Amino acid sequence: MVTQSLESVLRNHAFLSDLSPEHIQTIISCASNQRFEKDDLIAREGTEADSFYLIRSGTVALQIHRPESGGITLNTLGESDVLGWSWLVPPHRWHFDARVMESTRVIALDGRCLRNKCEQDHELGYHLLKRFSTLIEDRLEATRLQLLDVYGVPAR
Amino acid sequence: MTALDPMAPIPAQVQKIDRENHDTFTLHVAAPGATLPPFQPGQFDMLYVYGTGELPISVSGDPEARFSLTYTVRSVGKATNKLVTSSIGDWIGVRGPFGVGWPMDKARGNDVLLIAGGIGLAPLRPALYHMLRYRSEYGRIVLAYGARGPNDMIYRGELARWKKEPRTQVLSTVDYGGLRWRGNVGVVTTLLTRVRLDPPHTIALICGPEIMMRFAAMELVNRGLPQERIFVSMERNMKCAVGHCGHCQFGPYFVCKDGPVFPYTQIEPWINRHEI
């Protein structure tokens, strides 16, 4: 098995591509490799959102809990996707549960650490915000399409 | 050899009906004593439901099946409802095949990404059968399939089998998963982040609701796939199937004879025009 360094994984992840080597080095100090197994909860709705995750492999379901019936999946995330932006937006609380559907490898980024780095280096903050804005726009667009029910029978 | 009259249906008999989901069925028909014309993946036939009307339906079976033709039909109106409620032995009329199919020659030697939405998987299935039969002639095959819900998916048994094919990736997702669904949830375009694209050596074939196709094509272009490597299958109100009646006009094209499969470069200037 080929083991990649944290630096090379971060550099090659689509979300951070084109980020300068200096900024990658800054981010590494807030990053760690983590692995989750099926049914693990990476995040729980309402708890402090102190991290976000770059998914390297596996599948994670964003779920909302409904009493008596359990978690309803709103969206699934997989390889190359990013999990979580609540670490960036006060009050830094998770809005959904993030449940592992199959064994998942991630790079976890410490949100508090990264927020401090961004306060010290606004250029890094700007580059990260640009990426998160694109991510949020993509998710919003996908959600709108999901709501459209494009596979329904067209009205006559 | 006398050419077949494109306006004269060949009588064909329903041999078998498979229920795909609550409103979609796959019909297998044969023409005893006659030869059903061969088709190219992506082409369609006009199916005449006697006494009710004629319907353009993509051929969804194996292009090399000699003695039967297969169609997957969703019940959305009077004629389609009568077709899907046929009994074994009922007769229908078949004329065709019509139109331009998938560019299998261009796809040869390349990775092929198929993006299907809902019943849009039906016109892509013959292309998949063809590539799996001539597997060594094609690179990696990736199928990204989206449906409304788990029970709306079609060809469920085959989706599971295709996953086991070598150098083949099958991803599926639904818009609404419900409580027991353990698979992916989200629109089909969200699957594309999980596909390793090699843009200069990939051909994309897309079929599904037009909105889905627009967004899928945009996403592929954003990911570096040249527009000329993207092909979409359009759907319009096809009636005559030979470009005479004009019902299926789409900008300067007739979908029945210039399509239904178009290079994205050809239709991109028209696909976002509200007037068309």
Image (tube, grey):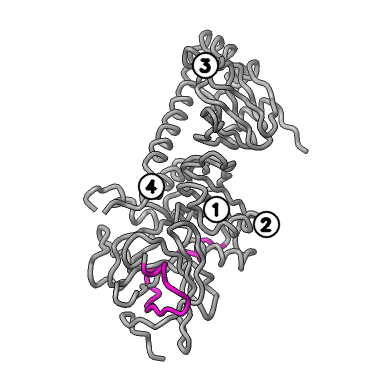
Residues under labels 1 and 3: Cα distance? 37 Å
The residue wearing badge 4 is: A150
Residues under labels 3 and 4: Cα distance? 32 Å
The residue located at (50%, 63%) in the rendering is B19
| Residue B155 placement, left or right of B123 | right
Q: Which mark is residue A93?
A: 3
What chain letter is assigned to the residue under label 3? A
Pick out the residue farthest to the front.
Answer: A68
Circle nearer the viewer, 1 or 3: 3
Name which residue type carries label 1.
Answer: Leu
Residues under labels 1 and 4: Cα distance? 19 Å
Tell me if residue B19 is in the magenta stretch.
no
The residue located at (41%, 56%) in the rendering is B232
Q: Residues within 10 Å of mark 1 (few under 14, many from 20)?
A: many
Name which residue type carries label 4.
Answer: Val
- Quarter containing the N terminus of chain B: bottom left
Q: Quadrant of residue B13?
A: bottom left
Q: Establish whether labels 2 and 3 are both on one chain.
A: no
The residue located at (54%, 59%) in the rendering is B155
What chain letter is assigned to the residue under label 1? B
For the residue labelled by badge 3, is the local secondary structure a helix, a strand or a loop? loop
On the question of residue A124 being in view, the answer is no
Range covered by the magenta-colored residues: B82-108
Q: Position of residue B182 (x, y in %)?
A: 59, 41
The residue located at (38%, 61%) in the rendering is B75
Q: Establish whether labels 1 and 3 are both on one chain.
A: no
For the residue labelled by badge 2, is the local secondary structure a helix, a strand or a loop? loop
Q: Which mark is residue B143?
A: 1
Which mark is first along the chain, 1 or 2? 1
Circle nearer the viewer, 4 or 2: 4
